[in-house]
Image (spheres, rainbow, N blue to C red):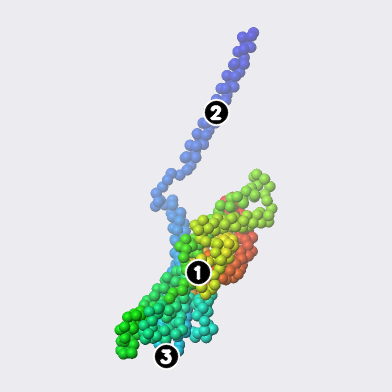
Amino acid sequence: MSSNADQGPRVAHRGSGSDHTLNEDRDGAKNDGDQEKQEEKSPAPVGFWSPELAQTRKEVAWRWLMIVGILMVFILTVLSLFWGALFKAYQNANRLKIAIVNFDNGADAFVGPMITNVFLNERQKNPMTLGFEEHQPSEFDNNPLKVREAVYYYDYYGAVIINSNASYLLQQAVETGNSSYDPMGAGQLIYNEARDQDAYYDFIYTIMYPLQIEIVSQFGRMWAGKVLANSTLNNPSTLARAPQALSPAIGFSTFNLRPFYIPVAIPAVSVGLIYLIIISFFSFSFFMPIHSRFMDKSKHAPLKPMQHLLWRWLSTVVAYLLLALAYSLVSLAFQIPFRYGTAPADQVSDTANAYGYGSFVIYWMINFFGMFALGMACENMAMILGMPWTSMWLIFWVITNVISAFYPLQIEPRFYYWGYAWPLHHIVEASRTIIFDTQSSIGLNFGVLIAWCAVNTALYPFASWVMKWKMQRGQKKGQ
């Protein structure tokens, strides 16, 4: 009995295992059968020119041609903006005004009139030169320092000053053999390189330096001939004591009011700001998956739409604030100085900041509002356009901001004057003011950027609605 009882369970267990094995075999056979049926149903690959792909080939070819056409039009339109900005740069160089102020204007003066005529004749015979303009000393209260102030305050891109009594001092040096006579005291060249270092080297220096050499050369030949032909002046012993009064006789002292003396500042006021646009653009794709967690119905109740919108906007703005700080700290880490005070407008200074120790905070804030203005525009367009069209927007946004900020708008065709309202133009201007203590329009700069922020914020709900509508439409098509 006991042996039969022991065998019973073993038999039952063996039977259960057999049934399980049989079920697995049946399921495996069924799956294999389904797989074979699917393989039988899926068509075999065909060649590109197969008749079965005739309709598909037409659709693909049409869409390919349409996209290539759109991209060609985009390239011809948007890239033409970039090329066109400098298409007539030298023809428009005369918009860069250079003041010619002759303080050597006595009855017997000959140095001042000669220098003035050379510059004015240059403008008449060469249309692709700077905008030389003659101004009377009385316009500047007969004070050369007022001329420097005019250059500092962006009334002119530069100035040429012929110093008072330049002719008298030269003649006295020849007559008396004044060994302390300095030819460089005859005139002054006033610049403000930090206003736009590229314009300074590409236009101001490039045109002014040859003219300076020409003036000294022409005057030297004329003056040497005059002295040697005059028996009262042609005294070898007297000339030996002051040979510089004979040659070069005159020259120019250069006063660069705000030198662009920090090479590492180039990214801070030019190409580095492109990354400010790119960082703010790509932050959208980083944050969007995080924001969508609040609306995941499979895990919890979704957040109210208005609160979700508010969260997205607020978190984005705070992210811009912190990202702008990181961007600004790069400039600080590479020792762009933010510790100097201001300097007088009529004095040369290569150690000046606009706001002393507060300059870095102002610099951070201008980068923050700049990133807000640039980035929120990118986020709105990303929601409205979607991929891949957003990439085209980024190219357009970068190009239009670059041509309005990295080149003097005065030398660009007047069509480009809309650039005065573009965000990057004001970021660059404010950055130059903060770092180099150039003429300040900081209130206007912040005002324009804040206006961009306000407009972008007003459009943000609409852009979000468009994105939601497009997603819902895509889901319906998928179903």
Q: Are marks 1 and 3 in contact (CB under 8 Å)?
A: no
Kindly state the secondary structure of the residue where label 1 is placed. Answer: loop
Which corner quadrant of the image does residue 469 belong to?
bottom right
Q: Which residue is mark 3?
A: 108
Amino acid carrying label 1: it is Ser
Residue at the image position 33 percent from the left and 83 percent from the top: 238
In the picture, the disc for residue 349 is 1
| Residue sitting at the far bottom | 107
Kindly state the secondary structure of the residue where label 2 is placed. Answer: helix
From the viewer's perspective, is residue 151 above or below residue 27? below
The numbered mark, 1 or 3, whose residue comes first in the sequence reads 3
Q: Which one is in front in this view, the residue at disc 2 or the one at disc 1?
A: 1
Amino acid carrying label 2: it is Glu
From the viewer's perspective, is residue 281 above or below residue 439? above
Kindly state the secondary structure of the residue where label 3 is placed. Answer: loop
Amino acid carrying label 3: it is Asp
Q: Between residues 418 and 148, which one lies in front from this camera angle?
A: 148
In the picture, the disc for residue 24 is 2
